[in-house]
């Protein structure tokens, strides 16, 4: 089976700092922080919660709650595009990367992730995500998985 579990979920929040503090009180570790989006680990290296600061948090279909990512293994993400195609599911453009240029690698310090994006029948954003490594990753620009494996560290 391609899917190993739920990797991430997202919530809209009205105040980023107070939300980070709230989730830290629950024992979750801050993984990444910025002004408008932050992540806290639910299980380090396995699942996290994305917090998205929004002007309104009580709107029915805020973009941040119409996205989920399924955890897949790194060796499976290489085959994922073909696996989806066999099932009649098209990869969609993401971050300026056409479907042909995916999977792509996101520089989510301290962990790089390989990702592939598609939609369900209602247009909800779905993602396959595979952690590549947990050790410190130097700063890099988003790139294709093919470029990631071809680079020299």
Image: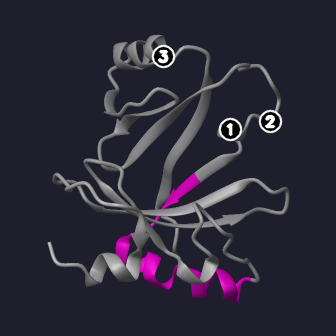
Q: Is residue 20 magenta?
A: no
Distance between mark 1 and mark 3 Cα atoms: 16 Å
Mark 1 neighbour class, 10 Å CA radius: few under 14, some 14 to 19, many 20 or more: some
Disc 2 + disc 1, Cβ < 8 Å: yes
Measured along the vertical axis of the image, is residue 66 above or below residue 78?
Answer: above
Instruction: Report whether 5 appears left or right of 40.
Output: right
The image quadrant of residue 130 is bottom left
SS of the residue under disc 1: helix
Measured along the vertical axis of the image, is residue 29 above or below residue 137?
Answer: above
Q: Earlier in the sequence, mark 2 or mark 3?
A: 3
SS of the residue under disc 3: helix
Residue at 41% of width from left, 63% of height from top?
A: 142
Distance between mark 2 and mark 3 Cα atoms: 20 Å
Which stretch is magenta? 69-87
Q: Disc 3 marks which residue?
A: 19
Task: Pick whichever, 25 or 117, lies toward us.
Answer: 117
SS of the residue under disc 2: loop
Q: Position of residue 15 (x, y in %)?
A: 54, 14
Q: Disc 2 marks which residue?
A: 61
């Amino acid at each position: 089976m391609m899917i190993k579990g739920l990797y991430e979920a997202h919530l809209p929040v009205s105040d980023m700092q107070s939300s980070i503090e709230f989730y830290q009180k629950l024992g979750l570790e801050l993984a990444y922080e910025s002004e408008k989006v932050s992540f806290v680990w639910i299980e380090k290296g396995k699942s996290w919660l994305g917090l998205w600061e929004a002007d309104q948090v009580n709107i029915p279909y805020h973009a941040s709650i119409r996205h989920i990512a399924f955890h897949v293994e790194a060796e499976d993400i290489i085959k994922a595009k073909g696996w989806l195609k066999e099932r009649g599911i098209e990869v969609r453009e993401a971050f300026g990367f056409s479907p042909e240029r995916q999977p792509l690698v996101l520089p989510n310090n301290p962990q790089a992730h390989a990702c592939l994006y598609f939609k369900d029948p209602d247009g909800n954003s779905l993602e396959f995500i595979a952690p590549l490594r947990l050790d410190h990753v130097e700063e890099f620009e988003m790139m294709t998985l093919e470029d990631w494996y071809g680079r020299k560290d």
